[in-house]
Image (spheres, rainbow, N blue to C red):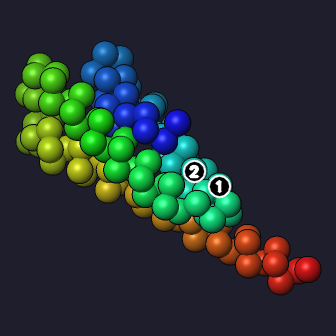
Amino acid sequence: MLCVPYLYLALLFDYYYHSVNLFIVLIFLAFLLGFALSRANRLRTLLLGNLCSTLTSYLLFAKCTEWHFLYQPFSPEKLILLLAGLYLLPQLLGIVWGNIFVRSHSQAR
């Protein structure tokens, strides 16, 4: 599940339907993923999943040459890196909240 090219799918949805709905859904998914994996103490899995997802998104996006002119002024490399960085923010917020809940739960015992 973590190696799914989320960024590519969001760009594909935007390209065909001219909608940012999937971008917004993926922001919430990134938060929930960061939260859940933080509570499960699986942050290495999250890092590996982000790397795999970004790499596969870039490789798939590089094959879509007609998209290169749609997302100006960004090149495919810059766009994927920008979006990957954008999706790290809600994951980091989810990690922080996951750690807060883990600490409060362990102190309550």
| Label 2, residues with CA under 10 Å away: few <14, some 14-19, many ≥20 | many
- Residue name at image x 15 percent, y 48 percent: 78
Q: Residues within 10 Å of mark 1 (few under 14, many from 20)?
A: many
Disc 2 secondary structure class: helix
Task: State the residue in front, 105 or 24.
Answer: 105
Q: Residue furthest top?
A: 16
| Residue at far bottom of view | 107
Element type at marker 1? helix
Circle 1 sits on which residue?
36
On the rendered structure, is 4 left or right of 76? right
Determine the image quadrant of residue 61. top left
Inspect the image, locate mark 2, and give the three-letter code of the amino acid beneath it: Leu
Where is the C terminus found, in terms of image quarters? bottom right
Q: Is residue 85 left or right of 37 when viewed as pictured?
A: left
Residue that numbered label 2 is attached to: 33
Q: Is residue 17 above or below residue 42?
A: above
Question: Residue shown at 51%/55% (left/top)?
Answer: 45
| CB under 8 Å between discs 1 and 2 | yes
- At which x and y percent is residue 4? 43, 34
Q: State the CA–CA distance, disc 1 to disc 2.
A: 5 Å
Q: Give me the residue at 56% from left, 57% from top.
A: 34
Give above or below for 36 relative to 56: below
Residue 96 image offset from top left, x and y in percent: 58, 71
* Vertical arrangement, residue 101 with respect to residue 36, above or below: below
The numbered dot on residue 48 is: none
